[in-house]
Image (cartoon, rainbow, N blue to C red):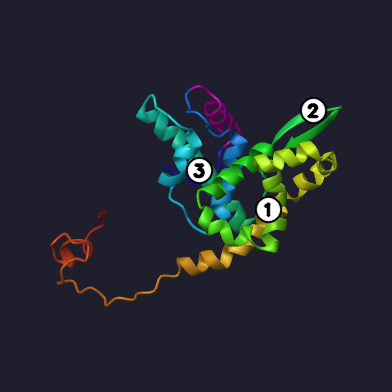
Amino acid sequence: MDLTNPLTDEELDELGDFLMSDATGEGALDISMLDGFLTALAIGPNNLPPSQWLPVVWGNGMVWQTTTQAGHMTSLVLRHANDILAYLRDEPETFEPLLYERDHEGQVVSIIDEWCTGFVKGMALDEEGWHSLMESEEGEDMLYPILLYGTEVGWEALENHPEIQERHDEYVASLGERVMAIMEWWLPVRKAKSTVRREEPKVGRNDLCPCGSGKKFKKCCGGQKVLH
């Protein structure tokens, strides 16, 4: 299974329709929420395993009809996640959030509520990790429209202060730049965590394997690819 190919428009529609269908659980993400969610995971301070975040995508009480369905839909999500990572790594200046649009008085208006809500859900999975950014002045500025359109507190502010809504187009246009700024903020942290230093003596091939299997290292983790 090749998880590096970007989704086609047809596959995006297929995934979007599935997420909105009765087949998913309560609170499943829609396609724009998913895009924001995966973006937060891609640029955040820690790499979270799919086993931690995939259940959020499908919603509470999700029951797959078949293993084929589960594998296919999961592969679509993982491919989209990898596509976001590739854009942010190789062509960050071309990154654009996946947004819904609606017609308003003859003009097409971008809707960012769902995308921002998804981004906030991604942050919530690693609340402790995001804490330092959220508490900084730079973080407040970078996250402002995301929290404005992605949280209940923000929705109340939008409802009570029409003058904030008048800056909607400005906030839409700035999302990509804010994603880049957040990614740059966390980049040193992610690089530091990816640097592995050996602090224990190297295990000899005839020593007992440190995994606790009771076998010699060369007959266990040192000689074959096994997961414990």
Majority secondary structure of the magenta segment? helix
Q: Earlier in the sequence, mark 2 or mark 3?
A: 3
Provide the residue span drawn in magenta: 8-22
**Quick check: 158 above or below 86?**
above
Q: Quadrant of the C terminus?
A: bottom left
Q: Name the front one of labels 1 and 2.
A: 1
How far, Cα to Cα, is label 1 from label 2? 27 Å
Tell me which amino acid carries mark 3: Arg
Q: Is residue 84 in sight in this rendering?
A: no
Q: Name the front one of labels 2 and 3.
A: 2
Q: Which mark is residue 143?
A: 1
Q: Measured from the top left, where is residue 214 in percent x and y?
A: 13, 62
Instruction: Say left or right for 220 vs 92.
Output: left
Q: Quadrant of the N terminus?
A: top left
**Quick check: 38 above or below 107?**
below
Q: Earlier in the sequence, mark 1 or mark 2?
A: 2
Q: Which residue is mark 2?
A: 103
| Residue 214 included in the magenta stretch of the image | no
Question: Few, some or many C-alpha atoms within 10 Å of disc 1 (few <14, some 14-19, many ≥20)?
Answer: some
The secondary element bearing badge 2 is classed as strand
Q: Nearer the viewer, residue 95 or 159?
A: 159
Q: Measured from the top left, where is residue 22 in percent x and y?
A: 50, 22
Q: Is residue 211 in sight in this rendering?
A: yes
The residue shown at (62%, 60%) is: 133
Q: Measured from the top left, where is residue 87 in percent x and y?
A: 61, 52
The residue shown at (48%, 39%) is: 56
Q: Which residue is mark 3?
A: 79
How far, Cα to Cα, is label 3 from label 1? 26 Å
Tell me which amino acid carries mark 1: Leu
Q: Which mark is residue 71?
A: none
The secondary element bearing badge 3 is classed as helix
